[in-house]
Amino acid sequence: MSKLVVTSIGPASSVQDGGRPGSQRYGLTPSGAMDRLALAAANTLVGNDLFAAAVEIGPFGATFTARGGAVRVGLSGAPRNADVSGRALAFDSSATLADGETLTLGFARGGSFSYLAIEHGIEGEPMFGSLAVNARAGLGSPYPRSLQSGDELKTKPASGAAERRIDLPVVADAPIRVVFGPQDDEFAEESKQLFLDSEWRISATSDRMGYRLEGPVIKHLNGHNIVSDGTVNGSIQVPGVGQPIVLMPDRGTSGGYPKIATVISADFGRFAQISAGRPFRFKAVTMADAQAEAKAFRELLRSLSERLRGMEDFGLNIEALRDANVAGQAVNAVDTTTWQVDEP
Amino acid sequence: MPETLPPPRLLPSGDAAITVEFSRTIDDAANRRVLALDRIIAAEPIGGVTETVPTYRSLLVHYDPVEISFDQLGEQLLARAARALPTSGKTRRWRIPVAYGGEHGIDLEDVAKALQTTPDDIVARHIAGDYRVAMIGFTPGWSYLSGLEKFLHMPRRQDPRLLTPAGTISIGGVQTGVQCLAGPSGWHLLGRTPVRTYQLHRDPTFLLEPGDAITFTAVDAKTFAEQDRAAEAGEFVAEQVEP
């Protein structure tokens, strides 16, 4: 039996997977990863099912130590400085920790959540088919709460498979796309336009239940109380103070504030990764466009295993490097052995 | 029931859910149509629909947009809604024990004062009610009941409490509710039930279904304590009775 021991970790870090949809009619929120693409990429790196349970790591640093045998991990999501016993590691790649070795992760850069998948998965007792932590409902395994230092994640010994990296599309720094509704008729046209025209920031008081937005006041036509109805990931509700709250995977299953719009499912993970304080905008799209994006996103998830590369397979990195430069990231140099990009 | 019920409104909740809205207000007839549509979708599943969530006035239908589009699903939902007439068919009825007042229901005296009557009268009226689970939401097992008599309608508290006990039985607005887990609430606390509407490792995990009929019965503190231990050990404690 190998295990990964959490030797230090910040808040907002927990075991998450694809979540537990199916019981929202009983008030049970689905929970699950904030950024499903990053979860799926981390799992793909170590040969797991796309939505197997992994460690969702909040913005602060963390360290993990392998005990009882080697442990193979995959890292994706918000990039960080990472090293194992002095060997620098790249994000979007796998690595094997020998027994006793420690993986050290720095602060998240350009995002909020990183995912650490463990080859063979994390041992635990599924509740409603999921290990995802939902602390308020006492759910989650191996611990029904955020991770703390000293926690142990049990798994099977590392396979010794060659390490891989994964070529992911460069994340566009584009507006977050929404479809209006279900209660956009509770807002005047000017309010809807103000919502689209304004620059928003995510408040530091945000959490896995909801992201509070800071920006102009969005006024209601008929007051802020509606009869509660159902919510989804990405519901943008506007309470009385007029500062919208975007509902996240630990949301209440019903809510009584008018919902002006909903983040499209393909953009939800990208939205979840926006750091507190960073400005961003919304853009309205049609239902047909949103559903076409949902299909493209599904195809991206399906293609992840085809995007795996050998660590030595550097020729293919040129494309990613070019994409990164096109996207405006200052990529100065690349270490060809680890695919480590220097910090700007 | 007339055959030409007005069609519900189809409201987009993003690209993977539709809110099927029957009313904008709390309306018992609308809630019955919500539950009827929920039942007909369970009986005649629609490919791509992953989950349905009934609320007072609408049915939230989660679906996979890769399998079915908004327009295709909307058509199917409207067709079913037109056929989904509320039935007077047999529903399950539960009798739920409640320890009213005192430490179990710290707002009972204040509610009686506000309504210019006695705590006993409040309890008698609450027990006399014939309630129905209109929806379950907010937190696991939190059951919102319709059927509260008008005399007991009260606005929510000005200052919602951040923590109210597990099993709280409360009133707020035109509703009464059975709360399962400890949590925040702005409603008035009349009592506590030992019944766990949600309990892990019990079969079923969730005791109540939307549409179930509910009556309350008063128990004393000693019985509450006994039943609370039995419920903790996995017993329902709630009694299923003939409709």
Image: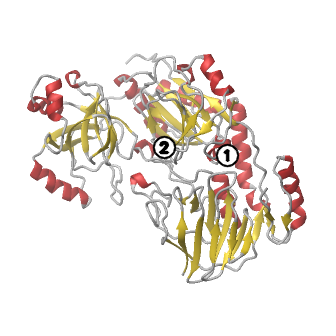
| Front in this rendered view, residue B233 or B29 | B233
| Front in this rendered view, residue A133 or A151 | A151
**Drawn side of residue B196 relative to residue A316, left or right:** left
Q: Name the residue rendered at 64%, 43% in the picture.
A: A271
In the picture, which quadrant includes the N terminus of chain A?
Answer: bottom right
Q: Decide: is A245 above or below A145.
A: above
In the picture, which quadrant includes the C terminus of chain A?
Answer: bottom right
Q: Name the residue rendered at 39%, 30% in the picture.
A: B56
Q: Decide: is A180 above or below A63.
A: above
| Front in this rendered view, residue B63 or A337 | A337
Relative image position of residue A219 (x, y in whole percent):
53, 21
Q: Decide: is A336 above or below B104.
A: below
Q: Is residue B178 visible?
A: yes
Q: Is residue B43 visible?
A: no
Q: Name the residue rendered at 80%, 62% in the picture.
A: A341
Relative image position of residue A228 (x, y in whole percent):
42, 31
Q: Which residue is mark 2?
A: A251
Q: Which residue is mark 1?
A: A270
**Drawn side of residue A290 relative to residue A311, left or right:** left
Label at residue A144: none
Q: Name the residue rendered at 34%, 57% in the picture.
A: B203
Q: Residue B227 is drawn in which quadrant? A: bottom left
Label 2: element kind = loop
Q: Residues within 10 Å of mark 2 (few under 14, many from 20)?
A: many
* Distance from the alpha carbon under mark 1 to that under mark 2: 18 Å
